[in-house]
Amino acid sequence: MKNTTPLRRIVIALALFTLILLGLDITTHHHAKVAFLPHFGLYLLVSVGAGLVFIVAARILAPFLSRKEDYYDR
């Protein structure tokens, strides 16, 4: 077996996952009536919004909370 890098393994896994989802998407009837349809993307939008808020907060607070690289050498 070939020795592959972790990045290459991640890319291969994501490509396989994408192909599986594409296959499932092709076989799904998209105009079926389902009960969760009015709120389908609500939790996705809330999760993405919360993630962006945390990323912005981390970028703003990082200079105040981080230490200099030579902190432990002193």
Image (cartoon, rainbow, N blue to C red):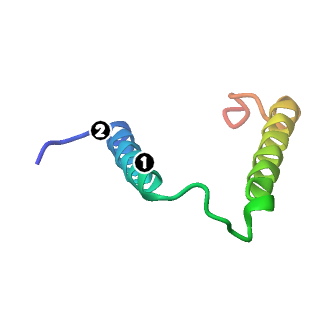
Residue shown at the point (42%, 48%) measured from the top left? 22
Q: Which amino acid lies under the numbered mark 2 shown in the image of this protein?
A: Thr
The percent coordinates of residue 74 (x first, y second) are 72, 32
- Counting from the top left corner in percent of width and height, residue 63 is at 84, 29
Q: Residues within 10 Å of mark 1 (few under 14, many from 20)?
A: few
**Number of marks:** 2
Q: Which-is-in-front pick, marks 1 and 2? A: 1
Give the mark, 1 or 2, whose residue is nearer the N terminus. 2
27 or 24: nearer the eye?
27
Quadrant of the image occupied by residue 37: bottom right
> What residue sits right under mark 1 in the picture?
22
Q: Is residue 24 left or right of residue 71?
A: left
- Residue type beneath disc 1: Leu
Q: Is residue 7 above or below residue 18?
A: above
Q: Is residue 35 above or below residue 43?
A: below
Look at the numbered disc 2 and give the secondary structure of its residue.
loop
Residue 37: mark in rendering: none
The residue lying at 78 percent from left, 48 percent from top is: 45
Give the CA separation, mark 1 to mark 2.
26 Å
In-front residue for pair 53/60: 53
Judge the density around disc 2: few (<14), some (14-19), many (≥20) Cα neighbours within 10 Å.
few
Q: Secondary structure at mark 1?
A: helix
Image side of residue 5 versus residue 71, left or right: left
Q: Please state the horizontal and vertical placement of residue 71, each as a whole percent of the image.
A: 73, 33
Residue at point 47%, 52% (across, down): 25
The residue depicted at 57 percent of the width and 55 percent of the height is: 30
Query: Farthest residue toward the left?
Result: 1
Residue 58 versus residue 13: which sits nearer the camera?
Answer: 13
Q: Which residue is mark 2?
A: 5
Residue 50: image location, x then y, percent: 82, 48
